[in-house]
Amino acid sequence: MPDYKAPLRDMRFVLNEVLDMDGHYQGLGLEEINSELLNAFLEEGAKFAENELAPLNRSGDEEGCGFNNGEVTTPKGFKEAYAKYVEGGWPAMGGDPEFGGQGLPGSAGIAISEMTGTANWSWSMYPGLSHGAVATIEEHGTDEQKQAYLPKLTSGEWTGTMCLTEPHCGSDLGILKSKAEPNADGSFNITGTKIFISAGEHDMAENIVHIVLARLPDAPKGTKGISLFIVPKFLTDGNGGVGERNAVTCGSIEHKMGIKASATCVMNFDGAKGYLIGPENKGLNCMFTFMNFARLGTAIQGVAHAELGFQGGLTYAKDRLAMRSLSGPKNPEGPADPIIVHPDVRRMLLTSKAFAEGGRALVYLCAQLGDKVKLEKDDAARKEADDLMALLTPIAKAFVTEAGLEAANHGVQIYGGHGFIREWGMEQNVRDARISTLYEGTTGIQALDLLGRKVMMTQGQALRNFTKIVHKFCET
């Protein structure tokens, strides 16, 4: 398994030179946030990723998750690493100060997400979806719901999930069958089965807050009849803690090609008590708050696998000796030259490097646009950022994950036969990367979203706005 080293120099280049984060934050009135502060986060985040998470990547893959009578246990070291993550205040970076957060914009934590993801993608999925749950409750929840859930979700003491997929439907949510029956006290009984729920059950946090799609009685058919609910594993006790166990259980965990240390759960809701979030029959609209976070998070996965494939391939190519350079010996004292001198190896390394660096720039740009969508006071500037982010999100999710998988495969190829052997870590990188082109909407679905909704529904205006930016850049 290659030793992961956070590419801090490349990260700083994108944040400071390409995106001018100092100017970005000043333009949003966030004068207390600057490159000096971000650099401190980067340094500490790198230490955590390299020293706490990377050593657990291979062992977690080999051990996997345990399942016994509805209880999921994570691999050795995962729970302890998560406790250090919470203790360090990392989950609270972007949280609202009213609920214990640090109030930093989303872009301030994007590099941290990349580092934890590259070091150990399976581990990073446990806290990863909590950000989307927080954003959904912040935007659509009632004051009472915010007070009940956001403090513990923000701190990381509780984690969150999103429960969409059912056995008979994946991305076509219009045919989901989960039901929500109203109770006299304003709550609902949620009944149904959800599958492929990342971190749906685990032993790392004291409570798990599920964000669930279900249908009310007499709801319209299709996507227009879906509502959104908060369904906690443990009901709240009214004082910010956990109360009685809710009727939601993990039926099984999947045995997967990759990300084996991440629990992918079948979740059974057997009349579980849930609470409506947002308007009735508008659940899919509210869920897109969550989905946009998840899609950007998956784009980070593409960057992570490209970076890990590049780092592993580069280290090996410098050390492995085979044949001589076409332009004459480069290691004349040795029996052969390092394979990094050979054109095909250099092609694969440079391709992986370009995918990692280009993907990083694109994802960080999307995070910067997200800041503007949330914090920009000028309506026109905010709409411009929102439109551009809408266009770029399916591109980031689809292209960067496909590129990350390609780079992971290059990592195996550079090692030759050794790449196929587990101890080198390159084959795990491919297995872990494979899911990224599938979840949060497959590559084909992202293409339909890009062309059908973002381009055609705007009559090409969104695309023209983007090509103007490219044209002006090229002119400069």
Image: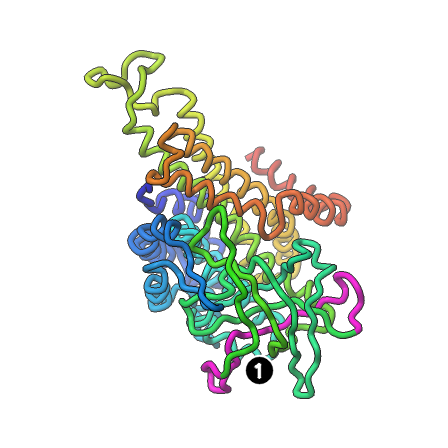
Q: Position of residue 62 (x, y in %)?
A: 37, 50
Residue pictured at 78% horizontal, 70% vertical: 219
Q: Position of residue 190 (x, y in %)?
A: 65, 74
Q: Which sits in the foreground, 299 or 200?
A: 200
> Outermost residue, front direction?
69
Q: Position of residue 331 (x, y in %)?
A: 24, 19
Question: The magenta stretch spans which residues?
Answer: 218-243
Label 1, on which residue? 144
Q: Position of residue 164 (x, y in %)?
A: 63, 61
Q: Total label count?
A: 1
The quarter of the picture where the C terminus appears is top right
Query: Is 423 above or below relative to 206?
Result: above
| Residue 398 sits inside the magenta stretch | no
Asked which secondary structure carries label 1, the reply is helix
The quadrant where residue 122 appears: bottom left
Q: Which sits in the foreground, 97 or 329?
A: 329
Would residue 377 be seen by someone viewing this image from the given angle?
no
Residue pictured at 40% horizontal, 25% vertical: 345
Q: Name the colour scheme.
A: rainbow
Q: Residues within 10 Å of mark 1 (few under 14, many from 20)?
A: few
Query: Is 448 above or below relative to 92?
Result: above
97 displayed left or right of 287: left
The quadrant where residue 413 appears: top left
Residue pictured at 54% horizontal, 66% vertical: 133
Q: Which sits in the foreground, 281 or 47?
A: 281
Q: Amino acid at mark 1?
A: Glu
